[in-house]
Amino acid sequence: MKREGENMKISVVGSINMDMTVTAEKIPKKGETITGRELYYIPGGKGANQAVAMARLGANVEMFGCVGDDGNGALLIENLKAQGVKTEHIKTVEHTPTGVAFITVGERDNTIVIVAGANNRVDRAYIGHIEHELKKSDMVLLQHEIPLESIEYVIDLCYRNQIPVILNPAPARSLKQNLIEKVTYLTPNEHEARILFGAVDRDELLRRYPEKLIITLGSKGVCTCRKSGEILTIPARPGNVIDTTGAGDTLNGAFCVKIAEGANIEEALQFANAAAGLSTEKLGAQEGMPVREEVTNALRV
Ligand code: RIB
């Protein structure tokens, strides 16, 4: 584990999307048509968002993934570079559209529909191509917006090479038990935890995986179980919420950075929770992601 400022290498293997975000007074119900306020094209994708969250906090981070050979793909790579994320091994796939997400923001919440496009090409062949680079990582962060066989392979690769892995299982999808055993941290929200484990009492579930399972609770914060069996809940910090898109990504990125620096789980979650809160104060997944000083200042209050 390395200290703040040291050249730890964190790798993200995941999705890169263009978010088409509509702001509206409310989120429409099934069958309902409403008029939106504005439409924005904003860089997103859970993988890219987590990489940007870490770069903003000063980490040495590389993004591994695929974009299409369209305007969005080129723009998204430029955006990552501008944010300080390494992009050398991102593949531009021919005759394939870049991933997009259709997001409605209203009532301090959102709904998201993604069309994977080139994210589906983060396949075993691509992983084989980047495997050598991945092995140089101090830590790897994964989500669920790329093919499952790639996620399984990367987890196995990291396990064999003793590289800690955080899996943010979003969007929800079931997982083989042996994969859960191999990841260092698993960070579902409550809905994803239900898909992964069924309708189990939350505290009972946390006690099954002490200091491994971290459940994010949205506006209620984040919780885990200490090795002692004590449940640790860190409440969300009050803030002026504009858009919650990417708050989970900020939490995962900030948590990863602190753990890679050697923080204990409570310190890392306090830091990540504060970063996630700050990220909701601007529109778009990446726009509100804080730099380290902003998080440190927020933690002093
Ligand atoms: O977590 C938020 C992200 O989910 C958005 O940026 C969107 O692209 C989807 O991947």
Image (spheres, rainbow, N blue to C red):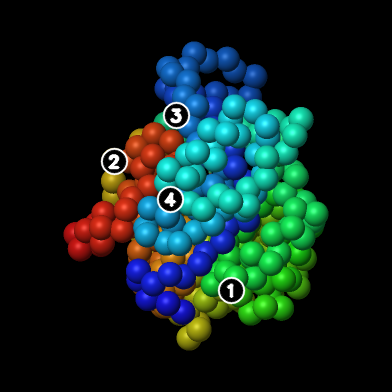
Q: Which residue is mark 2?
A: 240
Of badges 1 and 4, the one in the foreground is 4
Q: Earlier in the sequence, mark 2 or mark 3?
A: 3
Q: Could you say where residue 131 lies in the image, as x and y percent from the top left?
A: 71, 64
Q: Which residue is mark 4?
A: 84
Where disc 2 sits, the SS reads loop
Marks 1 and 2 sit apart, C-alpha to C-alpha, by 34 Å
Q: Which residue is mark 3?
A: 106
The tag on residue 115 is none
Q: Nearer the viewer, residue 228 or 82?
A: 82
Where disc 3 sits, the SS reads strand
Looking at the rendered structure, the kind of residue marked 1 is Pro
Where disc 4 sits, the SS reads loop
Q: Nearer the viewer, residue 48 or 198?
A: 48
Q: Earlier in the sequence, mark 3 or mark 1?
A: 3
In this view, which residue lies farthest toward the bottom? 228
Q: Earlier in the sequence, mark 1 or mark 4?
A: 4
